[in-house]
Amino acid sequence: MTDLLQIIRNIVSYLDDFGMLLSGICFLIGFALTLKALKGAQKRQEQGGHGGSWASPMSNFIVAGLFLGLPTFINLLNVSLFAATPSAPESIFALADSTIGVLEEEVAREMITGLVRIIQFMGLIAVARGLYLLNQSAQGNQGPNTFGPGFTFVVAGICATNFPIFVGIMEKVITA
């Protein structure tokens, strides 16, 4: 029977491949949104004042740029919220020293480091999903309100990509 540590090791070993896949998907989404924005702008220009608003092509273009530059966008938000770029998973032991930092066993430390890497990767996915939902909200389509969930995904994803610092801040807030 496979133990939990081996499962975490297996998942972590594939995170680089999944990261490349996620980068490719975000690039394709950004490229598709750029084409959609240019097509919408062309349609709006041809129809003149009766072509509708510029909001849809502009939001597509802005979100396309964010998808194409997703790593830079994530670093920008991390610096804005935490005044630091995403930290290494191993730094959780120094940043949350009174709770997680007391672990001495190597197996427990490896397991927590692996879980932090998984959480950071899930944060990247959350930011991408949030950007997509924010773009849907800006389109003004009939349907459910997607601004709140989109914004929540972006903020939660940024907290997850910088999970060690987030845990350190939460520890200081709770134990202070």
Image (cartoon, rainbow, N blue to C red):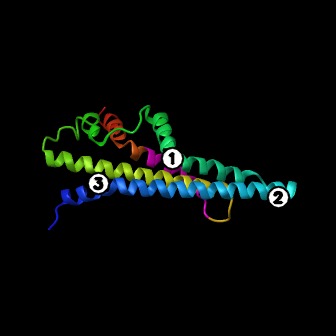
| Residue 153 lies in the magenta-colored region | yes
Query: Label 3, on which residue?
Result: 12
Residue 18: name its quadrant: bottom left
SS at mark 2?
Answer: helix
Residue sitting at x 31%, y 57%: 14
Q: Nearer the viewer, mark 3 or mark 2?
A: 3
Question: In the drawing, does residue 135 fall left or right of residue 165?
Answer: right
Q: Amino acid at mark 1?
A: Leu
Query: Label 2, on which residue?
Result: 51
Residue 55 percent coordinates (x, y): 72, 51
Whichever of callouts 1 and 2 sits on the residue coming sooner in the sequence is: 2
Question: In the drawing, does residue 29 fall left or right of residue 20?
Answer: right
Question: In the drawing, does residue 124 fall left or right of residue 59?
Answer: left
Tell me how far mark 1 sits from mark 2, CA to CA.
31 Å
Residue 57 percent coordinates (x, y): 71, 53
Q: Nearer the viewer, residue 100 or 55?
A: 55
- Say whether marks 3 and 2 touch (CB < 8 Å): no
Residue 100 percent coordinates (x, y): 23, 41
Residue 103: name its quadrant: top left
Mark 2 residue crowding within 10 angstroms, few (<14) / some (14–19) / many (20+): some
SS at mark 1?
Answer: helix
Residue sitting at x 60%, y 47%: 65
132 vs 98: above or below: below
Confirm whether residue 149 shows in the render: no
Tell me how far mark 3 sits from mark 2, CA to CA.
49 Å
**Where are the magenta residues, as a range?**
144-158
